[in-house]
Image (cartoon, rainbow, N blue to C red):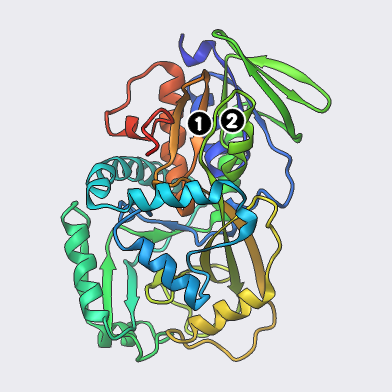
């Protein structure tokens, strides 16, 4: 069956759902996108806006267990957990710890690289054909700790091994080029291929493109999913309909949706928070990663976006924490020359879908082959969404995908 013969329901109107809908519609499929349209689905808008082909190391990597314990003891919130994460937390944490190995990195990096490269190609096309803007200077990782030199050298050695363009840059020259930086910067790594976009603009463009291709949008909550070998029935509070395929692209809420067809995707919600500060003097011309502070920044047209946090929690934990925002700004001041006061702060929060092995789930659910998962991207949903949409369309149409992309299958071993 080709996509031109298909009708597909995509559940989730964030970047992954919209990218999937657009690619399916380009194939000729009749597409419905279902999303409540409520503020809780704001993760695609609250993130740092990075598009980074350098992010080929899975979150589950050697050293992350120690990092998590350190952050929990120090209450930094960069990688933490709350009791609200529920009964899955213990099993998730055990699987995560088992995945933090060199072997897992070797297995995962080629697949993540293909997914990211595919996304970068699509976004590059959008910057040429739409009003989407991007930064044009290399992303800088900035190190300030006593181990700065060692950490920077390790980052370069690790990523160049996988073909990523990562180079050391003189910190003194960095401070000259970007006056917003403080002299506390002791080491810099430049990533030539990484850049930033306005995440809100990217989502807007995807939705606009979907509408131009005739994608239907329904503002509803899905209340049930059932399946046969030939189709999928989607139910809401007011209606039900049959599709040839359904795509689960609801981020952290995909876990609950998968339960309708008897699947147990081990996804937890990982909360992050961002603030965008307008009127910042010496606005940088590139994206920064404050490596020791675990803060990502991006100079948007309307302010400096700063984002941090990976707190395992529940999908109900959606409140914006003003104390966390104040701490985020205070921590960023260790590296950045920021004003003492701001006229306005744009605070956002979102929960990312965190898989215990740090890899997304892309592919048919084993118990429901006509239900396609497109979730579990963790902190990288914006930069992996376009590529995910492409591979979802390939799978629905029957086009082959590489063996590396098959590593994202929901049928993979779950430790």
Q: Is residue 311 above or below residue 221?
A: below
The CA distance from mark 1 to mark 2 is 9 Å
Q: Nearer the viewer, residue 83 or 308?
A: 83
Residue found 41% across the figure and 27% down from its top: 411
| Quadrant in the picture for the C terminus | top left
Earlier-in-chain disc, 1 versus 2: 2
Q: Are marks 1 and 2 in contact (CB under 8 Å)?
A: yes
Q: Nearer the viewer, residue 63 or 17?
A: 63
Whole-percent x, y for residue 212 in the image:
61, 32
Question: Which residue is farthest right?
Answer: 238
Q: Is residue 339 above or below residue 234?
A: below
Give the left or right position of residue 315, taking residue 143 as reference: right
Quickly name the residue at label 1. 373
User: Mark 2 packing: few (<14 Cα in 10 Å), some, or many (20+)?
Assistant: many
Whole-percent x, y for residue 159 in the image:
22, 58
Give the left or right position of residue 265, taking residue 235 as reference: left
Q: Quadrant of residue 118?
A: top left
Residue found 37% across the figure and 61% down from its top: 65
Q: Is residue 402 above or below residue 195?
A: above
User: Mark 1 packing: few (<14 Cα in 10 Å), some, or many (20+)?
Assistant: many
Disc 1 element: strand
| Eye-nearest disc, 1 or 2 | 2
Whole-percent x, y for residue 70 in the image:
42, 73
Disc 2 element: helix
For residue 258, the mark is 2
């Amino acid at each position: 069956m080709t996509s031109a013969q298909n009708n597909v329901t995509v559940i989730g109107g964030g970047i992954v759902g919209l990218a999937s809908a657009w690619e399916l519609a380009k194939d000729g499929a009749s597409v419905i996108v279902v999303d409540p349209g409520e503020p809780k689905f704001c993760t695609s808008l609250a993130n740092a806006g990075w598009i980074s082909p350098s992010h080929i190391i899975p979150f589950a990597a050697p050293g992350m267990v120690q990092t998590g314990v350190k952050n929990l003891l120090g209450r930094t919130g960069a990688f933490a957990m709350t009791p609200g994460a529920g009964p899955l937390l213990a099993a998730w944490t055990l699987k995560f710890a088992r995945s933090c190995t060199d072997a897992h990195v070797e297995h995962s990096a080629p697949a993540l690289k293909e997914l990211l490269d595919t996304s970068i190609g699509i976004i590059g096309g959008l910057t040429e054909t739409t009003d989407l803007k991007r930064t044009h200077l290399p992303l800088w990782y900035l190190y300030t700790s006593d181990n700065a030199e060692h950490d920077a050298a390790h980052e370069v050695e690790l990523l160049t091994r996988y073909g990523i363009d990562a180079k050391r840059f003189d910190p003194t020259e960095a401070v000259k080029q970007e006056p917003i930086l403080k002299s506390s910067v002791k080491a810099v790594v430049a990533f030539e291929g990484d850049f930033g976009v306005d995440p809100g603009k990217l989502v807007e463009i995807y939705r606009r493109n979907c509408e131009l291709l005739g994608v239907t949008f329904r503002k509803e909550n899905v209340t049930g999913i059932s399946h046969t070998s030939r189709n999928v029935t989607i139910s809401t509070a007011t209606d039900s309909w049959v599709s040839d395929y359904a795509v689960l692209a609801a981020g952290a809420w995909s876990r609950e949706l998968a339960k309708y067809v008897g699947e147990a995707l081990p996804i937890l919600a990982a909360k992050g928070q961002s603030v965008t500060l307008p009127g910042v003097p010496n606005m940088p011309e590139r994206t920064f990663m404050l490596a020791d502070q675990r803060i990502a920044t991006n100079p948007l047209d309307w302010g400096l976006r700063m984002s941090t946090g990976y707190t395992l929690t529940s999908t109900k934990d959606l409140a914006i924490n003003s104390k966390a925002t104040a701490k985020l700004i205070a921590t960023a001041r260790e590296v950045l020359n920021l004003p003492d006061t701001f006229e306005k702060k744009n605070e956002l929060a979102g929960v990312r879908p965190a898989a215990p092995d740090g890899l997304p789930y892309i592919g048919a659910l084993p118990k429901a082959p006509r239900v396609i998962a497109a979730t579990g991207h963790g902190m990288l949903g914006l930069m992996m969404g376009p590529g995910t949409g492409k591979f979802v369309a390939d799978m629905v149409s029957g086009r082959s995908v590489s063996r590396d992309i098959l590593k994202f299958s929901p049928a993979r071993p779950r430790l």
